[in-house]
Amino acid sequence: MSEELVTHFGGCHCGAIRFQVQAPPAIKAIKCDCSICEMKQNIHFIVPASRFKLLQGEDNLTCYTFNTHVAKHTFCKTCGVQSFYTPRSNPDGKGIMPHCIDPGTIKKTTLEVFNGENWEKSIEMNPEIQQRSKEN
Ligand SMILES: [Zn+2]
């Protein structure tokens, strides 16, 4: 099954980081409540890495990791905004912040809550999430 994809553009607050991502106009976003996502109010949608392209700002990115060090919490060195990152659930894909996408191309956002405080159990109950970084 393949959904219609559009090209969304986005980036951080100061404009140093800019990217494009191909995704449906109707986004399925995840709100995670693990220790860091709760502090950051991390809402993201997952795409295969091949559908994400960093257009500028590679040198302006910095990265924070902890615990399993699988998730790569990349953010802008200048403004501190995380506009995309590499999620633990899909280390071969990208997690994109829908609130960092330029207005106009996202037609609908459906929010799902992921209980990241109990990560192992939650991913076992929602195996579909790990398919989101795979091409279909
Ligand atoms: Zn910035």
Image: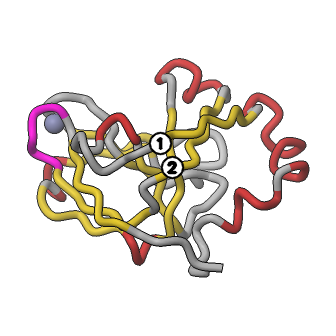
Mark 1, residue position: 108
Q: Please give the name of the residue rendered at 10% of the width and 33% of the height, measured from the top-left corner.
A: 14
- Write down the region rendered in magenta: 13-17
Q: Image check: 123 left or right of 70?
A: right
**Of helix, strand and loop, which mostly describes the magenta segment?**
loop
Badge number at residue 118: none
Q: Please give the name of the residue rendered at 71% of the width and 62% of the height, measured from the top-left corner.
A: 130
The reply to whether the residue tagged 1 has its Cβ within 8 angstroms of ligand 1 is no
Expressed as whole percent of the image width and height from the top left, the position of residue 23 reads 43, 63
Foreground of the two, 20 or 121 = 20
Q: Quadrant of the N terminus?
A: bottom right
Establish if 49 lies above or below 80: below
Q: Please give the name of the residue rendered at 17% of the width and 32% of the height, measured from the top-left corner.
A: 13
Tell how many labels: 2
Three-letter code, disc 2: Ile
Expressed as whole percent of the image width and height from the top left, the position of residue 127 reads 82, 59
Residues at discs 1 and 2 in contact (Cβ within 8 Å) = yes
Q: Image check: 95 left or right of 127?
A: left
| Secondary structure type for disc 1 | strand
The reply to whether the residue tagged 2 has its Cβ within 8 angstroms of ligand 1 is no
Mark 2, residue position: 27
Three-letter code, disc 1: Lys
Q: Residue 16 colored magenta?
A: yes
Q: Image check: 37 left or right of 20?
A: right
10 Å crowding of disc 2: few (<14), some (14-19), many (20+):
some
Give the CA distance from mark 1 to mark 2: 6 Å
